[in-house]
Each structure stands twice: as C-alpha cells, then as structure tokens.
Amino acid sequence: MDGAAAAALLLLLFSLSAAPVRGQGSSQDAFIIQYLERRLAQMEERLSQCEQNIVSVTQKSYDLSSEVRGSLSTVSVLRSEVKSQVDSVSARVDRLERELEYLENKIPSQSDIEMEEALLEQQIKAAELDQLKKKATIRVQNDCSAALSQIKSVKIVKKVGDSLGCWFKDPTEGSEKVYLLSGIRNNSVLEFGSLQSFIERTTPEKVLKLPVDWQGSGHVVYNGFLYCHKADTPNQVLKVDLVNGTVVDSTLLPGAGRLPVYSLNPNTYLDLAVDELGLWVIHADPEYGGNLVITKLDKVSLAVEYTWDTQCRSRDAEGAFFICGTLYVVYNTRYGGRSTVQCLYDIHDTIHSNESPVMFFPKRYTSHSSIHYHPGDQQLYAWDDGYQTVYKVETRRNDQAAAE
Ligand SMILES: *[C@@H]1O[C@H](CO)[C@@H](O)[C@H](O)[C@H]1NC(C)=O
Ligand SMILES: *[C@@H]1O[C@H](CO)[C@@H](O)[C@H](O)[C@H]1NC(C)=O
C-alpha cells in the first residue's frame, strides 16, 4: 500500500466523521464509526494479505529464476561435454585415417615380398655353405672315420654315491685314471688309479677339493684338467688343474644356460664331452626351438672354435655322447625305460639321422644321468641311477668320410 492510497483513506474518514456528528445523534455517529473501523480493519487485513502475497510471489519468482539459472548452467555443461566428445571422436577418426594411410604405404607390393623371399633363401643357402665349409675345415685337421653301429653289452661296475652323478675314465692316451663326481653339486672330485682300483677300493686314492662348486653331471677330464660347469653361473665353463685344484681358465659359453641340456636331466645345463677330435660342449638353445647346439672348444684356451645348431631336440633326451665328431643323442621317457639313440649330428655331414636306424641300449629300466664315450676303450661310461655301468659299443668305418 503506497502513501497516496493511505492519504485518500484518511480524507474519507475525516469528511465522514466531521459533518454528520453535529447534525444527527451521537448513537448514529458511533454506529458509523464502528462501521468505518470494521471496514478499516478489513482493509488492513487485505493490505497485509496483499503484502504477504507480494513477498511469496517475489520469493517464487526468485526461486524460478535461480532454477532457470541452474538449468542453464547444466545445459552449458552438457553442451561442452557433447562438444568435447564430438571433438575426440573426430580426432580419433583423423588418427584412424592417418594410420590407414601409413599402413597402406607400408604394405609392400607382391613383388617386394617375392624379392625378400628370394633374398632369405639366398641367405639360408649361404649359411648352409658356410657350415659345410666349417665341417670341411675340421675334417682336414683330424682324421677320424668311426661311426656307431651298435651298443653291444652292459656291465654294472659298481654302485656308489648319489642316484645322479658322473664317472669316466680319463680319455687321455695312456692314462688309466678314473674320476667320480657324485651328485649334482659339490666341490669334490674323487680320483682312482685305475678301473681295477675303482672296483676294489672303498675309498679313492685322492680326493680333490675345488675352490668352487661344480654343478650338473656333464663334466669331463682331459689331459690332467677337469672341465666343468661352475655352480651358480648360467654358462661358465672352468678348466681346473687336477694336480692342485687351481682354476687355470674359464669361459662363458655364448647362448647357453637358459635350458637344461636334456629335458630328462633337469640339473645339467652344460654337458661336456671328449672324443677323437677334442673337447665339446652341448647345450639346448630356446631360440632354436630347444634343440641341441654343439660347440667345439679349444682344450688349451677354452676359446670357441665352431658352433653347430643340430636338429636333435632336447625334449625327452636323457644324454648324449660324441664319437669321432658325431653327436649321438639318447632318448627315453619320463617314466624310465629302454634308452635309445634316435638322433645324431655329424659335423662332417656324412652320417644322417634319417639313414641311421634307431639304436637300443641293452635292457635296463632307468634313465642315465651321464654318458661319456672313451675313444681308446670304445666304451661308454654311464651313471644309471647310482650304478656305474659300462657299455661296449661297436663302430664301423664310415666309408663316405674315409673316401675323402
Ligand atoms: C660332496 O661329495 C663328497 C664325496 O663324494 C660327499 O661325501 C659329500 O657328502 C658331498 N657333499 C654334498 C653337499 O653333497
Ligand atoms: C698348480 O700346479 C700347476 C702345475 O702342476 C702349477 O703350474 C701351478 O702354479 C700350481 N698352482 C698352485 C696355486 O700351486
């Protein structure tokens, strides 16, 4: 209610009350005053109602406007969200297009592929030729033509030591000494003067303690030196002087030590061998499908002379031995059984697995933890579940190698 309306109301009250008060009676005046007072009260009430309504309308309009403002901001958030999604989709489409373009450029045409295949074939041929040449070099240096034809008989010599281990007669010409390394890790090497003394004696003639442990069951002795795998290293070969046990040389065999050589002998990572041509190491290479890799080492310096990848697998193999530059790999089953030679690798390339029949070992129903060939005796020295056994083998002249 504003000032003008209030003034008009006062004026009306004044004119109504002033004139008739004197002309008519006081009771009539009182009645009019009462009436006016009632009307006044009614008007005041409506006035306050009006005021209340205005307040509530103002409140409502305020609420509404804030609601609208809130909605507006939500809408703008949504809009920016949609916009950023659209942007990211379009960026992805862009990237996809670029990648497609890049790939289209990368995919060579058919003729490129053929060229590469031809190149690869050429490289394989060159590598094969290289290997043949290496084989030829070895052949010139050494004359050796024996090939395994049969494993004739078995003789159990003794039962001593752990179920796993390694024993052999020193293959050096003129030496009679016998060595025994029991278990798969130790620093002891037992030496006997001869096979006879090994059979008869309960204690060795000499116990050699190395300054470090050997590991596995692939050791050899050659010319008064022990060659063994140093424990706790993946691929270190040691050369140890057997007179006083000093390590005189060592080498790391490239690529070796990631797989056991033979899957049935999980503790041996390097298997050493000696034959007519010298010192060998056999290992399994995971990069070559777990197949066996053979390395010819210089027995004096331990330098790597040559390396050959064979097609003989490590799976189900229990051991291997060398005769005259040919690797013979012995297989069995996990449950033990009759061992057989099923794969061979001739570095001269004159004997082939597929031409050679499977050769059976004489009946013995366990698996070997080590097998060593002795070129002078033409015998295999093997460790068969704690039994030291000897196999007599029959060799034939390999005419193809002899003819050249
Ligand atoms: C090491 O070898 C010796 C002789 O063979 C043996 O008495 C000893 O128990 C072996 N030590 C271990 C830890 O196998
Ligand atoms: C061990 O013996 C070899 C030869 O027998 C000798 O050259 C070397 O010096 C000896 N080493 C030690 C530490 O006695």
Image (cartoon, grey):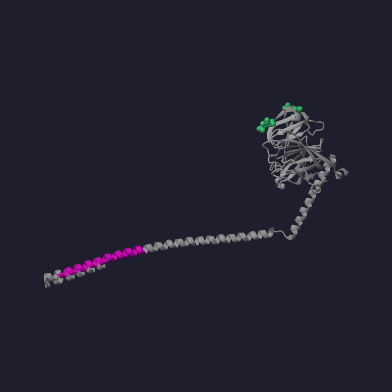
Instruction: Report the residue at 34% width, 64% height from top.
Output: 58
Q: Which residues are magenta?
A: 31-60
From where the camera sits, is residue 322 visible? yes
- The one of 222 and 362 positioned closer to us in this rendering: 362
Q: Quadrant of residue 391?
A: top right
- The one of 316 and 298 positioned closer to us in this rendering: 316
Question: Which quadrant, please, contains the N terminus?
Answer: bottom left
The image shows residue 13 at horizontal and vertical percentages of 19, 69
The image shows residue 55 at horizontal and vertical percentages of 32, 63
> Does 49 lie within the magenta span?
yes
Instruction: Report the residue at 17% width, 71% height from top.
Output: 16
Q: Quadrant of residue 374?
A: top right
> What secondary structure is the magenta-colored segment mainly?
helix
Marks counted in the figure total 0
Left or right of 293: which side holds 77?
left
Question: Which quadrant, please, contains the C terminus?
Answer: top right
- On screen, 265 above or below 8? above
